[in-house]
Image (cartoon, helix red, strand yellow):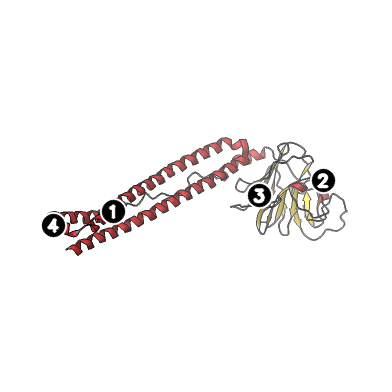
Amino acid sequence: MEQLIAEKLQQAVTKLRQLEEECMNLKVFTAEQITKWNEKIEVQKQKIQSDFKTLQRFLHEEEKSYLWKLEKEKEQTLRRLRDNEANLEQKNHELQSHILELENKCQGSAQKLLQLNGIYTEEILVSAYSRSWAVKLEQPEALSLDLHTVCNVSELYFDVKKMLRRHQVSVTLDPETAHYELILSEDRRQVIRGCPQENLDNSSRRFSALPCILGYEGFTSGKHYFEVDVGEGTGWDLGVCMENVQRDTVMPQTPQSGFWAIRRCKEGYVALTSPLTSIHLTEKPLVVGIFLDFEAGVVSFYNMTTGSHIFTFPKASFSDTLRPYFQVYLYSPLFLPPPDE
C-alpha cells in the first residue's frame, strides 16, 4: 500500500512538472513576442517619421494621425500580451504550490496515513491525485503581431504629385555639355548612349571624362521640380550639380564635388554621398521626380511610379547656379517628359 501511494503521488508530480515546464516555455515565448512587437513598432515608427519628414509641412497633420494610431495599437496589443504574461505567472505559482504540497506528502510517512481511518485516508489520496490530474494549463490568447497601422505613402500618391507639380519646370538637354558618346533627340528631351559622335567641338563645357550631360535650364533660387522617365533602364545617375563642376576629369560625384545625385547600377540604388548611401526600394521606379528647394538647401528624389520618397540629401548651402545632371548608361535611354504629360 505504501509503495502504491508513493507511485501515485510521483505520477502526479511528474504530470505537474510537465505542466510547469510547458508554462515556462510559454512565458519565454510571450516575452519574445513582446520584444518582437516592440521592435516592429520601433521600425515602423522610424519609417513613418522619416517619410513624413521629407514631405515636411504638407503632410504634417497626417504624420501625427498615423503616429497616434500606431501608439494606440501598440498599447492595446502590449496590454493583452502583458495580461497573458501575468496569467502565466499566476498559473506558474499555483503549479509550484501544488507540487510542493504533493512532494511534502511523498516525503511524509505513509504509515501515518495508514494509521488514520481507512476511508479518510482513501479520500485524502483520491483528492490529491484527482486534483493533480484536474489541473489544466490554458493556452494564452493567440495574438497576431501583424501591424494594422501601416504608413503607405503610395496611398498619398496624388497629393504628393500635386504638391510637387506646383513647382514643375520644363527641362531640356544642353547639347553643348553632352559627352561625345551621347545622342540627343531633335526636341532635346531624350538621350541615349551609342557610338562616339564625330565633328564635335572641344568646348570646355562638354563632359569628356564621363558620359554625362546637363539640363539646359539653370536654377539660382526658388523651388523647382522635374521628372525623368528611366523606363526599364538598368543604370543611370540623376540629380543636380553646380554649374562649375569639373567635366574633364573623373572624380567622386558627391556634394563635396558639387553633385547631388542618386544612381542605379547592378548592385542596386545608391545616393552619391561620401561614403555611398544604399537605398532600399520595394518597387523599381520607372519615373523619378527630382525636387530642389534652393534657399532651403534641399534636394529630394521621388519614385513617381508609386508616389513614394526615395532619398533626401542632408541640407546644403548653394552658392552657384544648379543644373539638372544626368549620366547615361548603355541600353538605358533617359527621357524628360514635358510638364503636361
Q: Which residue is mark 4?
A: 115
Residue 218 position in % (x across, y down): 78, 42
Label 4 vs label 3, nearer the camera: 4
Q: Which residue is mark 3?
A: 287
Measured Cα–Cα span from mark 1 to mark 3:
71 Å
Classify mark 2: residues with Cα within 10 Å, few (<14), some (14-19) or many (20+).
few
Q: Earlier in the sequence, mark 1 or mark 3?
A: 1
Residue 57 position in % (x across, y down): 61, 35
SS state under label 4: helix
Measured Cα–Cα span from mark 1 to mark 4:
23 Å
Q: Which residue is mark 1?
A: 100
| Amino acid marked by disc 4 | Gln
Give the residue drawn at x 41%, y 53%.
28
Label 2 vs label 4, nearer the camera: 4
Disc marking residue 120: none
Which sits in the foreground, 229 or 234?
234
Label 1 vs label 4, nearer the camera: 4
Label 2 vs label 1, nearer the camera: 1
Q: Earlier in the sequence, mark 2 or mark 4?
A: 4
Measured Cα–Cα span from mark 4 to mark 3:
92 Å
Q: Is residue 91 left or right of residue 64?
A: left
Q: Which residue is mark 2?
A: 244
Give the residue drawn at x 29%, y 51%.
97
The reply to whether discs 2 and 4 touch (Cβ–Cβ < 8 Å) is: no
Q: Earlier in the sequence, mark 1 or mark 4?
A: 1
